Image: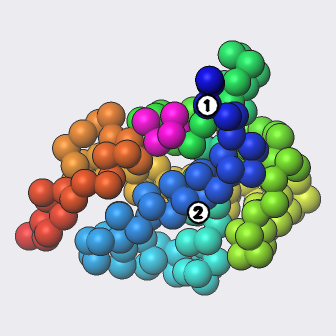
């Protein structure tokens, strides 16, 4: 008997968890976390807001990959499938910001994530001159993934790989 198909909500929940996992593992090295948070201050954006939007934007990128698979193969990528996708591929997929919201009306994010989602939608659709903010958030995501890939010494790093501790997690720059 085939496995039951995951609902869009279950896929979104996995995507949200993966976005959080990437940032939580990245933040295990305190100087890298501090550098990211200091960068938010340079933008004059509160760190909790920028961090929440960055995590949500990464979750949207995962969710968009699942939707892309649904269009091309007829079946969305499951949460387990998404855990095996290289993070570099998740963040390097070229797409317009508004494309990330395709199919998203089928899910109900939790209250905090819904707040960040509404802000991202405003930045995408209604806020004049918001492209810079979205580009900065995307850059944070890419930089976070690049640092994790370097830390694990694996350019094909996946969320599944993050379940294992990095032997280089305690590395401090000179």
Q: Please tell me the numbered disc located at residue 3.
A: 1
| Residue 164 at least partly seen | yes
Residue 128 is left or right of residue 96, and the answer is right
Query: Callout 1: helix, strand or loop?
Result: loop
Residue 172 is left or right of residue 84, and the answer is left
Name of the residue lying farthest toward the right: 126
**Which image quarter holds the N terminus?**
top right
For the residue pair 37 and 168, the one nearer the viewer reads as 168
**Which image quarter holds the C terminus?**
bottom left
Q: Quadrant of residue 133?
A: bottom right
Residues rendered magenta in the picture: 80-84
Residue 152, horizontal then vertical, whole percent: 22, 49
Nearest to N terminus: mark 1 or mark 2: 1
Q: CA distance from mark 1 to mark 2?
A: 32 Å
Residue 30, horizontal then vertical, whole percent: 28, 77
Residue 97, horizontal then vertical, whole percent: 74, 45
Query: Callout 2: helix, strand or loop?
Result: helix
81 part of magenta stretch = yes
Give the residue at mark 2. Answer: 54
The residue drawn where x is 66% and y is 46% is 11
131 part of magenta stretch = no
Labels 1 and 2 touching (C-beta < 8 A)? no
Depth check, mark 1 against mark 2: the one in front is 1
Compared to residue 68, the image places residue 33 above or below, namely below
The residue drawn where x is 70% and y is 24% is 75
Residue 116 is left or right of residue 3, and the answer is right
Mark 1 crowd level (few <14, some 14–19, many ≥20, 10 Å Cα)? few
> What is the chief secondary structure element of the magenta stretch?
helix
The residue drawn where x is 19% and y is 44% is 153
Mark 2 crowd level (few <14, some 14–19, many ≥20, 10 Å Cα)? many
Residue 7, horizontal then vertical, whole percent: 74, 43
């Amino acid at each position: 008997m085939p496995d039951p198909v995951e609902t869009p909500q279950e896929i979104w929940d996995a995507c949200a968890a993966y976005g959080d996992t990437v940032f939580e593992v990245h933040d295990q090295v305190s100087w890298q976390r501090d550098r990211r948070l200091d960068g938010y201050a340079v933008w004059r954006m509160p760190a909790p807001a920028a961090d929440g939007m960055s995590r949500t934007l990464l979750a949207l990128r995962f969710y968009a990959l699942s939707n892309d698979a649904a269009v091309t193969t007829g079946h969305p990528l499951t949460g387990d499938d998404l855990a095996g996708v290289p993070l570099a591929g998740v963040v390097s997929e070229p797409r317009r910001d508004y494309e990330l919201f395709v199919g998203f009306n089928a899910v109900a994010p939790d209250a905090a994530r819904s707040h960040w989602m509404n802000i991202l939608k405003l930045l995408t659709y209604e806020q004049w001159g918001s492209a810079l903010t979205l580009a900065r958030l995307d850059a944070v995501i890419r930089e976070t993934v690049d640092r994790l890939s370097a830390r694990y010494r694996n350019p094909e790093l996946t969320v599944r790989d993050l379940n294992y501790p990095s032997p280089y997690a305690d590395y401090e720059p000179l």
